[in-house]
Image (tube, rainbow, N blue to C red):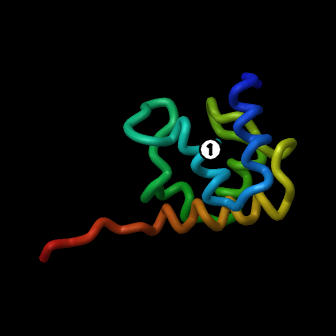
Amino acid sequence: MKPLFLACILASLAFGDSVVYNTVCNSCHAGNNPIAPSLVNNPILQDAEQTRVIITQGYKTMPPLADFLSESQIDSLSSYLQTLSVRKTASLD
């Protein structure tokens, strides 16, 4: 695991799920990255158990985070990611 990635995880452990997301997940999943797609409105995150598996075991190029996050942090991050999966853009109808 890359030292900077590990440092971001360790620095965010004392904070809530949105801080973990912003310091760990968003560094790769922000914007239009073909290797790490956006997590906002991502249908794969609609399933709570699947989201938890991805966090703990990793997925494709994403490393597993089970060794760096507590069970409660994994649960909180999973819940937070699910809120991103149901966000809708405002309609001007």
Q: Which quadrant of the structure image shows residue 49?
A: bottom right
Q: Position of residue 51 (x, y in %)?
A: 65, 57
Look at mark 1 in the image and give the residue it sits on.
23
Q: Is residue 18 above or below residue 5?
A: below
Q: Secondary structure at mark 1?
A: helix
Q: How many marks?
A: 1
Q: Position of residue 58 (x, y in %)?
A: 71, 40
Q: Position of residue 36 (x, y in %)?
A: 51, 36
Q: Which quadrant of the structure image shows residue 47?
A: bottom right
Q: Is residue 63 left or right of residue 40?
A: right
Image quarter in which the N terminus is found: top right
Q: Residue at x 50, y 62 (%)?
A: 84
Q: Is residue 87 above or below residue 35?
A: below
Q: Residue at x 62, y 44 (%)?
A: 23
Q: Is residue 80 left or right of residue 56?
A: left
For badge 1, the amino acid type reads Thr
Q: Residues within 10 Å of mark 1 (few under 14, many from 20)?
A: some
Q: Which quadrant of the structure image shows residue 10?
A: top right
